[in-house]
Image (cartoon, rainbow, N blue to C red):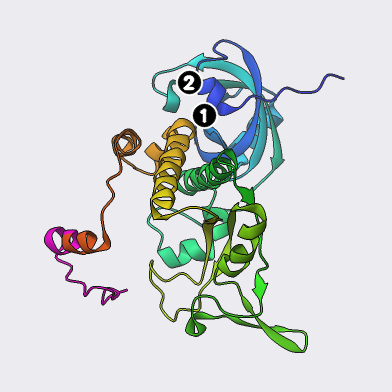
Amino acid sequence: MPKTKWTKIEEVIAGEHTGKSIHIRGWIYRTRSSGNIVFMMLRDVTGILQATVKKGNLPDSEFEDALKVLIESSVQITGTVKEDTRAPGGYELQVANLTVVNFAEPFPITKDQSPELLLDQRHLWIRSRKLTSILKIRSTVVGAIHSFFREHGFYEFDAPVLQPNQCEGGSTLFEVKYYEDKTYLSQSWQLYAEAGVFSLEKIYNMGPTFRAEKSKTSRHLSEFWMAEMEAAWMDLSDIIAIAKEEVTYILTQVLQKNKKDLEVIGQDISKFEATVTSEFPTITYTEALQILKEKEGMDIEWGKRPANY
């Protein structure tokens, strides 16, 4: 028996299957019915496609299933692709067969929900177009970090997450019971990097970082992932050049792979394009403070953190 060839929604929206019969699988994004017609919005990781189910075009039992499916039901559909300017993306799938893999329960998230509810339902909310796009962009960014350093002759060098001492400051350590002893969650990879650099010369890491800062703001994260590098024989100008190249490389990768995702989350793509084609200025710390004072009204004492940090 030949294996079923499943088509991705992005291929349909790109016009690659117009007039053809295809097989698609995904999840119900939205659905509504009118008489003998059911309009389904079907999603997969690549996009959203309208599927039109008409009574008489498929077995009655399958049409009844189409009437019953709720948001996030998983389905497999066979149908013919038709161009339709009224449909999102300009194409629709005229359904000939519908298999419901799983009937979902009523979806608890509707419009205008509070941030608290969305956090409680995070496992469902990550299926939204916005968060799906954010996760895809993040994947590109992390992959670009690895690619950039490896292409520049760096070796990936990992460090333990459980570490016996501090490297940033004792007040931000997360203490962990380690059998009969105690240890700490990593604040940084740097102490291990300072040893590893004399072996491998150019090393990098992308790993979890923990800071027990007693504040809950966008600037105080108890857990985050941090990219770090160490290299022998480099001076400050070399490090600045690497940093500029890395940022440009990452943004270029995001522009190449995630333009649609940037649009979904409402980003101005022209700003990204301008950034990757312009020269990064190099300024001193003192000049940076002066710019913040003149343009942002932030009067920060030299060497001190901002008052709201």
- Image height check: is 46 above or below 173? above
Circles 1 and 2: CB distance less than 8 Å?
yes
Q: Is residue 132 magenta?
A: no
Q: Quadrant of the N terminus?
A: top right
Viewer-proximal residue, 20 or 238?
238
- Image height check: is 122 above or below 265? below
Disc on the earlier residue, 1 or 2 = 1
- Image height check: is 20 above or below 23? above
Residue pictured at 55% horizontal, 33% vertical:
46
Q: Position of residue 69 (x, y in %)?
A: 61, 41
Given the image, on which type of amino acid does mark 2 rest? Tyr
For this orientation, the residue located farthest to the left is: 294
Given the image, on which type of amino acid does mark 1 rest? Leu
What label sits on residue 49 in the rendered view? 1
Describe residue 251's horizontal placement relative to residue 195 as left or right.
left
Overall secondary structure of the magenta section: loop
* Tally of numbered tags: 2
Q: Where on the picture, by quarter, is residue 187? A: bottom right
